[in-house]
Image (tube, rainbow, N blue to C red):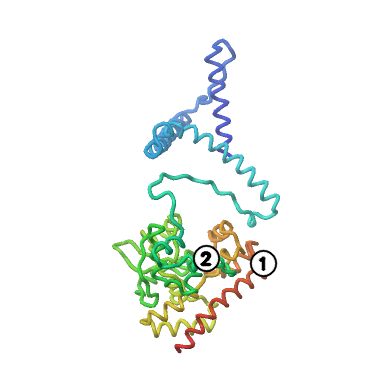
């Protein structure tokens, strides 16, 4: 709002100056500087910082998009203030229509970045078929499953592929690093370096150190924004790499156990700890690990845009994720109970596998 008003003021001042140039004999407007000694200094400093900002925008835009786009970056900066003003008006109308800002799925700006890598990725299922790890019939059966799951989990549950094959293909598809992970063989010193609220919030597990950089494992890509937020909270550089399905989830449940963890979960983790060298057992149990947030999104109970907004102020130390989503008005108690029942159903298979071993 303020930037929009500043642009209007700037237009008024330019108009006043043009009047004095075009019609010198007309009434002259008094100087805005008046007799102040400090105001001219502040205006010069502000002008210098504005020029510096314009130079940086023009320089980097020119490097990626060419000189023409670089020259247009200056007027675009002013135009963006007008866009922002009317976007605020639209947001206000949305909130008034919904009656609660927490239930509004905010529009996101579409950004186009330089094509530094391949413009289009081959879908995961097609990659697996091309490499002979999956048949067309198996892919079709997984895609048309009546239960809504991510394709990778569906393929694991049907035992068409294993978690190592899945993470290898995901890492290649997303051009990310990956490494095997046994969640029960992590240095306690690394676990102590990351608070429970950070690990639970971002779904990451500290697994190694490279100099001062802390390496975090995750089951999906972690955005640069999230890595930056983690780095600021930990006050050290961090980077992430992918881990096989279920390993990070088990690690978080083992090392950062919630006070609300039930007896079946504790028993499962105790058995897995005793048999931590049994990779086949770990693979079978990991297939059935699913986080509540992922389940809510995949089943269509919470749109990803709303879920990401809810995660901004979520604190696992104060309340559970389900309670947090209810407090923000994103789901009802009935929806939460249905999701927890679905999660428990998925988890029961893991409990049965562990009971066989125990």
Could you tell me which secondary element the residue under label 1 belongs to?
loop
Numbered label attached to residue 305: none
Q: Position of residue 241 (x, y in %)?
A: 38, 63
Q: Quadrant of residue 183?
A: bottom left
In whole angstroms, how far apart are the C-alphas of marks 1 and 2? 34 Å
Q: Nearer the viewer, residue 8 or 282?
A: 282
Residue 150 position, x and y percent, is: 52, 65
Find residue 140 and name its label: 2
Q: Give percent across and percent down for residue 317.
A: 52, 69
Asked if the residues shown at circle 1 and circle 2 are in contact, with their CB atoms under 8 angstroms apart, the answer is no
> Going 33% across and 61% down the picture, which residue do you hit?
213
- Mark 2 crowdedness (10 Å alpha carbons): few <14, some 14-19, many ≥20: few
- The residue shown at (58%, 70%) is 147
Q: Which residue corresponds to mark 1?
A: 332
Give the farthest residue toward the top: 25
The answer to whether residue 241 is above or below residue 181 is above
């Amino acid at each position: 709002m303020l930037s929009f008003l500043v642009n209007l003021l700037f237009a008024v001042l330019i108009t006043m100056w043009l009047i004095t140039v075009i019609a010198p004999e007309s009434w002259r407007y008094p100087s805005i500087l008046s007799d102040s000694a400090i105001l001219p200094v502040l205006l010069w400093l502000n002008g210098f910082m504005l020029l510096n900002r314009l130079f940086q925008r023009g320089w980097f835009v020119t490097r990626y998009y060419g000189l023409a786009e670089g020259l247009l970056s200056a007027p675009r900066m002013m135009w963006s203030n007008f866009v922002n003003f009317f976007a605020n008006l639209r947001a206000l109308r949305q909130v008034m229509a919904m009656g609660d800002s927490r239930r509004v799925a905010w529009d996101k700006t579409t950004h186009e970045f330089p094509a530094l890598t391949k413009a289009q990725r081959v879908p995961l299922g097609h990659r697996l078929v091309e490499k002979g790890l999956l048949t067309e019939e198996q892919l079709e059966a997984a895609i048309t499953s009546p239960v809504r799951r991510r394709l990778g989990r569906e393929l694991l549950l049907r035992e068409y592929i294993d978690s190592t094959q899945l993470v290898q293909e995901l890492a290649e598809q997303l051009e990310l690093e990956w490494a095997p992970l046994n969640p029960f063989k992590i240095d306690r010193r690394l676990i102590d370096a990351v608070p429970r609220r950070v690990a639970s919030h971002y779904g990451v597990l500290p697994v190694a150190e490279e100099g001062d950089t802390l390496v975090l494992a995750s089951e999906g890509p972690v955005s640069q924004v999230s890595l930056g937020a983690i780095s600021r909270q930990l006050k050290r550089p961090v980077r992430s790499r992918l881990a096989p399905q279920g390993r990070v989830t088990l690690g978080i449940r083992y090392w950062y156990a919630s006070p609300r963890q039930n007896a079946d979960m504790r028993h499962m983790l105790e058995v897995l700890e005793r048999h931590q060298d049994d990779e086949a057992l770990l693979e079978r149990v990991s297939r059935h690990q699913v986080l509540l947030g992922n389940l809510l999104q995949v089943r269509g109970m919470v749109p990803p845009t709303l879920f990401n907004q809810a995660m901004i102020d979520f604190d696992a130390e104060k309340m559970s994720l389900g309670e947090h989503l209810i407090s923000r008005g994103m789901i009802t108690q009935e929806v939460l109970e249905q999701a927890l029942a679905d999660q428990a159903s998925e988890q029961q298979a893991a409990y049965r596998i562990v009971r066989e071993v125990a």
